[in-house]
Amino acid sequence: MATAHKAAASRGGDGLPSHHLDDAFLLDYAAGNTSEAVSLLIATHLALCPECRARAEELEALGGAMLESLAPTAVDHDALSAVLARLDASDEVEPAVLTLPANDEGQVPSIPMPLRGYLKAEPDALAWQPVIRGLEEYELDVGGAKTKLLRIKPGASMPQHTHEGRELTLVLEGSYDDEIGHFGRGDVAILDDDHDHRPIAGPGQDCICLTVIDAPLRLTGRFGRFLNPFVKF
Ligand SMILES: [Zn+2]
């Protein structure tokens, strides 16, 4: 699974995300083939990312056009093939609901819709559960996968771990760095068992992330085995 958009390295510094969702995710989302949990993460990224929002709308329009014509002639493009495969594979294709940023005063709130709709309170007032020093979590009731908010103190690190399955992370506030790069607000990281990483939160403010985890993490660091029972992802 790709971890970052090709354009990632060339941008940044403008407050917009620099780590994006790839077309495979956007297509699955547009075709209604992602779980509620993954859909929530994707829709929340779209609320923060004009680039992926535009791309998702493009792909959705493409899917709509395919549905209408079902005349896949002269189509030789991975994205189009994927759309067609999806259309072939399912009898019923639900149109994606593309979420635009909440636009109260031209500002996207720290927790944008649709994620905001899943929380019962502002981040500060949530019933955070301590996990290890510097790391707290808040579990969300979302179908399809383990879904949590993580809050990491500035400068704190998470135990080194790898993944049995897939971990999607979306940064909502603050930032973190790991072996892959720097992740700030709106950035998405998609990790699987090829990756062994140890995220460290940036300075100055808590790092709050939304994570969706399809399968348990396998801790690999020095204290991994000791911590494993306490980090019940
Ligand atoms: Zn994006």
Image (cartoon, grey):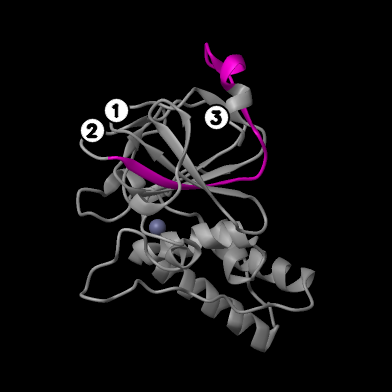
Q: Quadrant of ligand 1?
A: bottom left
Residue 152: percent from left, percent from top = 37, 36
Relative vertical location of residue 131 with respect to residue 211 in this rendering, above or below:
above
Q: Is residue 193 left or right of residue 115?
A: right
Label at residue 195: 3
**Closest to the observer, 28 or 184:** 184
Residue 229 placement: quadrant: top right
Task: Find out whether the residues at labels 1 and 2 contact each other: C-beta distance under 8 Å.
Answer: yes
Q: Estimate how packed mark 2 is, as few (under 14), some (14 to 19) or many (20 or more) residues with alpha carbons within 10 Å.
A: some
| Magenta segment includes 207 | yes
Q: In this figure, which residue is indicated by the disc labeled 2? A: 203
Q: Estimate how packed mark 1 is, as few (under 14), some (14 to 19) or many (20 or more) residues with alpha carbons within 10 Å.
A: some
Relative vertical location of residue 140 with respect to residue 207 in this rendering, above or below:
below
SS label for mark 1: loop
Q: Residue at x 35, y 62 (%)?
A: 48
Residue 69: percent from left, percent from top = 66, 87
